[in-house]
Image (spheres, rainbow, N blue to C red):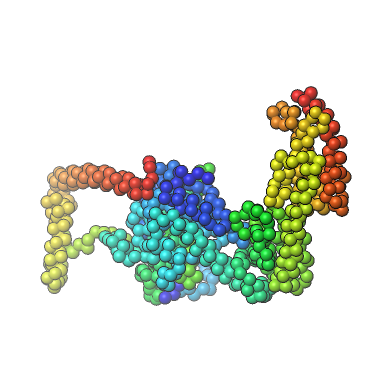
Amino acid sequence: MAFEAFPPLIADQLHYLLNHSSDSIKIENVRSGNRFNPRILDRFTLVIPYCLDAIKWDVIYNSEYPSAPPDFIFGPDDEDFMPCSSTIAPVDSLLDKALSEWNNQDSTLLLVLIQGLRDQYVAYQRKRVGQVDDDRVKFEISTVLTRKRIEMQMTSGADKPEEVKFAVPLVMDMSVNKLVVGCPWKNEQKIYLQVVYPILRKYESAPSSPRLKLVSSSDLKALFSVVDVKLPPWMDGMCLAEYLPHLEETLERQILEAVSAIVVRRSFVEALTLFLGRPLEADPTFCRKASFLATSGPFPFVVHFFFPTQFPKQQPALMLQSCQHLNQLSEPVKLNLLTDYPWSPRWEVGRMAERLCDFLTDEAVNFKKYCNEALLQH
Amino acid sequence: MDDLSLERIEIPGPTLASLIQRASSSPGDVDGLLFGQIHRIASTTLSDDSPAEPPPSSSSSSSDQIVATVTSFISSGKTVSFYDPLGRVDSRRIDSLQLGSPDRLLGWFSARRTTANRPSMRELAVASSLSSRFQLPIENSESPNSMPSSVFILLTTPLTDQLIHTHEYRAYQFRPLNRRLEPRSLGIVNIGPAFRGHYGSFNPKSGFPPLLCEVSSSAMMNEDRDEGSLSGKKQAVKDQKEVDALADGFGVGSLKRLVGPEAASYTGGVEEMYERMLAKVESLASEVEKSSAKVLELDNHNRKLRYRVARIER
């Protein structure tokens, strides 16, 4: 993202905000409110993650008076959100202080403002959800509030059904980051359960079960895919406080399995080296990818292995790439992903590697033929 | 104090036009104060038709409407002018802005380019602070007879260039009870038969001094005058002097010569007076032009300094 068009001091504040925020905030829709210099940008929209969704807040500076603090416009559904209209109360919060003692040379202040506002927004949404006239939601709030950092959101509107959304961070007895050897992640990886309660209308008798969805921080995908997790069923009359411990236990077990799967994948790659020699390239942390140089007579080619998280239950996908043939675009000729070959998860790792290499020897002949044909057409 | 709801907010066409012009000609965002009046309008159910159908049975007092009329405004030329960044209103700064305006403070406005047309965090706080500290009387009403200065007009320009219109405006009233800015319809009052109803309760208020000087010199009036205090007389003499200065040696008393047999011969004198007045206006206009040029120069200089402080290179 280029910040050159912003006045330097505003650009500093933005840089600091985007680099130091614990949430991954995005900036969009940058624009100018200056009549004489429309190239000087001074207003933009921040996309801030909230409750596994995003809220959009407009930030308005005045490039004609760059020393003044920014103003904010919140979402159209949040017109009751008034973080600093406490005209009677004394100035005490960090947010109020940052605004009233604004200093545009201090590049950290925008982050302080956004964090302060977001904290207030969490409280505001919790209050809104607390006011919902629904027995189940009231009960859930009272039982689940002992858990920290739960975010709630009330969605309502003319065309949308009323819903209450919870984002519950799941608590596990271990740190995923510490389990992975040589972990490259900066932030602690987390898994959240999103629970959406439809609000009961007057004429409905029994509450329908909530919609559940697991969401993980994006880096976790390399190790463990939450999409593959089969959620335990939600029984009638169940509540979140009952449901969560069971789910957390299941997930804990599955993550441990996923971590041990790294070892299996690594030993498989090591077994392959007996047949194919040292890999050209291999993912050392999660062992999700490995590339080997192979030959079939005088024909050299590269085999790429892509390992699913479910390995060895699911077999790796293979891709063959020629070292001698180029297509019309001057790219190496490649074969589509191969997943259909003899495989059994019950085989020993050494046998897996051996069988796979047998398959490769046969496939290499076909691949060479395919490459030569591609070259002739060319 | 009751939390009264405004039925609508009215603004004369020229005032709105000048407000939009002020917003669009300013280099950046601006805010300012709105002045005006609040009226209670008794809704009449009289009609020329025969009263075959009785009017809906609602008590007259409850169907009264309260209407705010914006009569003038003053722009500060910048933002965060009469309040602090937290939105707390500074009454001293309001007084210095309000200086010389004969109207009562009705509310305020904010104009900002390429932004969403809903109130911002600070605007809400300012409206709340302003309405808690200033109020103005409701004309032709017994009780309650005053109301907070709760009107807010928001002027924006659209976010995308694809739209045909170039300006957007919305009017709001701040309601202390739910601490919200509620949208109100903004009625534009123009001259013409269609708008005659709007002037029913309108009291014109101009900046012209209350003139006690008398043109007529009837004995009755003189007697009344004698009863007046000394200070009243002094005021009258002062006003007379002001009027004489405006007329440029042309006695107000001699206006009566315009009527009657002398009129024909006197028109020359009147024309001469008008010419002198026009010359005066012209010289005044050129002076204003010169001083505006100076103000613009200073303004540009200030902007350059501000940019230098913010390290913006042009």
The quadrant in which residue A131 appears is bottom right
Q: Is residue A115 above or below residue B77?
A: below
Identified at 74% across, 53% down, the residue is A262
Quarter of the image where the C terminus of chain A is located = top right
Count of numbered tags: 0
Left or right: residue A79 versus residue B268 is right
Identified at 35% across, 58% down, the residue is B81
Q: Is residue B145 above or below residue B21?
A: below
Left or right: residue A213 versus residue B295 is right
The x and y percentages for residue B295 are: 27, 47
Identified at 73% across, 57% down, the residue is A259
Identified at 70% across, 47% down, the residue is A283
Q: Nearer the viewer, residue B237 or A305?
A: A305
Q: Is residue A198 above or below residue B304?
A: below
The x and y percentages for residue B34 are: 37, 60
Residue A208 seen in the figure: no
Q: Nearer the viewer, residue A67 or A237?
A: A67
Q: Nearer the viewer, residue A40 or A326?
A: A326
The x and y percentages for residue B111 are: 42, 53
The quadrant in which residue B10 appears is bottom left
Residue A109 seen in the figure: yes
The x and y percentages for residue A76 are: 55, 58
Left or right: residue B313 versus residue A1 is left
